[in-house]
Amino acid sequence: MGILPPFTGIAVHDVWAPYDTYAPAGHQLCCAHALRELQAVTDSAPAGRWCWAAQAADALTGMQALVSEAFGQGRDAADPAALTVQMHRYRSAVLPGARQTAARSGTLMRKHRALARRLPGRQDDYLRFTTDWRIPADNGSERDICMTRLKQKIPVTPRHGPR
């Protein structure tokens, strides 16, 4: 349709490969997508063991909270020391994650491996929102879609009684 080829702003999107073909555009990979993928890894991890994905998700949401707090207070930047701590937590989670998923046995482990490699490999695209506040951490439609999907998953109790 000719909409994206001339686009030169920052596109906030999931990791669907064709988006990356739009070279003039900058990219902010959707953190909501990443958090869902990290939760899936965490859910499949053995109970009671440290999980790289849980730490990465905590660090990512920590960075989002720091940016949101600073923005809400009218500051120009998030607390650099606190942001550095969260960045370190993020990196110290995703690097072991790539090693832990190296076996790639089965479809699920291959997905986990792809995520574990993508997070550090595209770190700038996932964390662009921390330095450029014009860019949201996720695309706004994600929130709308998630709420609609959540409502669809809530069981509806059938009405009993006269009609």
Image: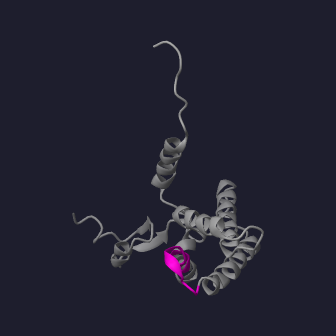
Tell me the quarter of the image containing the C terminus: top left
Looking at the image, the residue that sits furthest to the top is 162
- Applied colour scheme: one colour
Tell me the quarter of the image containing the N terminus: bottom left
Would you place residue 133 above or below residue 116 in this image? above
Would you place residue 77 above or below residue 52 in this image? above
Q: Is residue 76 visible?
A: no
| Chief SS of the magenta region | helix
With 125 as the anchor, is 6 left or right in this view?
left
Would you place residue 1 above or below residue 95 in this image? above
| Residue at image location 52% in from the left, 46% down from the top | 147
Magenta span contains residue 105: yes
Provide the residue span drawn in magenta.
102-114
> How many numbered circles are shown?
0
| Residue at image location 75% in from the left, 75% down from the top | 85
Q: Nearer the viewer, residue 44 or 122?
A: 44
Residue 113 picture quarter: bottom right
Q: Nearer the viewer, residue 60 or 129?
A: 60
Q: Is residue 40 visible?
A: yes
| Residue at image location 54% in from the left, 76% down from the top | 115
Percent position of residue 29, x then y:
49, 70
With 144 as the anchor, is 50 left or right in this view?
right
Q: Nearer the viewer, residue 49 or 140?
A: 49
Percent position of residue 121, x then y:
53, 83
Percent position of residue 146, x then y:
51, 50
Would you place residue 3 above or below residue 155 in this image? below
| Residue at image location 65% in from the left, 58% down from the top | 68
Magenta span contains residue 82: no
Residue 26 picture quarter: bottom left
Q: Nearer the viewer, residue 159 or 57?
A: 159
Percent position of residue 79, x then y:
73, 69
